[in-house]
Amino acid sequence: MSETNDNDDPETRPETRPETRAEPLALPLDAWHRAKGARMVAFAGYAMPVQYEGIIAEHLWTRESAGLFDVSHMGQLTVAGEGAVAALEALMPGDLQALKPGRMRYSLLLDESGGILDDLMITNRGDHFYVVVNGATKWDDIGHLREHLPDDITLNHLDEHGLLALQGPKAAAALGRLGLTPASGGMPMPDGLKFMQAAAFFWEGKPLGISRSGYTGEDGFEISVRAGDIAALADALAAQPEVRPVGLGARDSLRLEAGLPLYGHDLSEKTDPVSAGLAFAIPKRRRADGGFPGAGRIVQLLAGGVPALRAGLALDGRMAAREGAVVLSGDREVGAVTSGGFSPSLQRPIAMAYVEAALAAPGTRLEIDVRGKRLAAMVVPLPFVPHRYHR
Amino acid sequence: MSRYFTRDHEWIEVEGDTGTVGITDYAQGQLGDITFVELPAAGQAVKKGDSVSVVDSVKAASDIYTPASGAVTDVNHALADEPELVNADAEAGGWLYRLKLSDPGELGGLMDRAGYEEYVGGL
């Protein structure tokens, strides 16, 4: 028995990217995960829990109750200084002028030709911006930001903070029982936050930065916490009856069902935001005024269309198609799968693929070549499983 | 009746000239939730070491290499609807396929249970 080669490209597997050290680093919750029975794997240079009781059980638990994820491998950055709005808008296409304090947006770091260097979440924290970037790309991102941000803008890597995600329909009830207090008067309780809002809180005197956001398609929160406080917070959350720890394996199947792209797989410097279906991250003012990397090309793609689009595919049968599998229309190669697997919620295999734009409309019948077998598939709208955000 | 094990975590139970093949309990634990099993066709001739089956888990697809050569006589049809049987009962009800052995001498290079357990203990 050995893993087949259909997903073995070292260039696209984050665990073998150059920043990976010989020995993966331990995250602040390392011992906590091991005590909970996690199977640890190397990911983005860290030892990370891939599963506890099993990926399908953890996945379904998150959809019906609440899952606790340790995502401390992700890069947490702050950007401060007069002119931070303009400096950041020169590197990403989001409308940061319009981003009010306590609000967050999905955005992208772009290269000069509009290729995607990373996708990220950026929050206006009032006196600074807080940015969460992918773990596998954070060192490159920090280098990119240091190189391109003006000298009077301060970039900080919050490498003494961990990040927890509490996701699922019962996340708010579980978090509500911890007795948090808002860090400043007039701010809402965590349950008062709506999707893509954020605020600062205290829990037993410990500062927490909480946003109502996540990577599962469910209601939920991401909680930035000092590394020294994270084990106590994880214990307090896991003690709630709604909450179980959930590993990276289910995080991947949940985000796939939610139609959310994964950097290094569905997105790369070779993909542009329009082909990736992320045009929503480029608001009207930025399209009109430009001033972000690759703006000329991206505006052209928005107007003239793209040759291929990121699309959802629902497969017949039970055999999964994974990254690299070729998509066919008749005998013609029309695309490639960028991530795929068995959907625990839908009980069938699903995949995301870049497909010729003319064949990317929902309802189009295609085939996927998996180890010489042709699997029937149909283009379906993303997300595969409806989002249930608290708006 | 004797059971042999491979370093790739397959088992083969031999009775006369018939072998029944599956993956070990250790293997199913490593793979996690199994969602699909691609089985060989009855009548298919297989050669020791060929990839003859694929076990798909939520995480990845894994090749199963036949521990012995021969002709496939039967497959575990229950796995079509219930691939999770391999998780629940890897070394009995979750068997994959049977074959008529063409060269029982090949079994000599495989491990017995004690040898396999020692091997897994060192992984």
Image: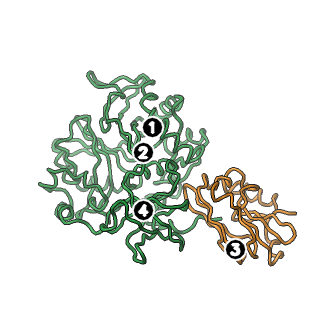
The vertical placement of A198 against B85, above or below, is above
Spatial distance from mark 3 to mark 2, Cα to Cα?
40 Å
Q: Residue A204 falls in which quadrant of the image?
A: top left
Q: In the rendered image, what is the letter of the chain coloured orange?
A: B
Q: Which residue is mark 1?
A: A168
Q: Is residue A211 left or right of residue A166?
A: left
Residue A18 visible in the current orientation: no
Is there CB contact under 8 Å for labels 1 and 2?
A: yes
Whole-percent x, y for residue A339 in the image: 44, 60
Q: Residue at x 87, y 63 (%)?
A: B1
- Precedes in sequence: disc 1 or disc 2: 1
Decide: is A124 above or below A322. above
Query: Which residue position is annotated with label 2?
Result: A216
Q: In the image, which lettered chain appears green?
A: A
The disc labelled 4 sits on which kind of residue?
Met
Disc 2 residue type (three-letter): Thr
Q: Chain letter of disc 4? A: A
Three-letter code, disc 3: Gly
Observer-nearest of A315 and A292: A315
Q: Amino acid at mark 1?
A: Gly
Vertical placement of residue A240 versus A120, above or below: above
The one of A194 and A73 positioned closer to us in this rendering: A194
User: How far is the residue under mark 1 from the one under mark 2?
Assistant: 8 Å
Q: Chain of mark 3?
A: B
Same chain check for tags 4 and 2: yes
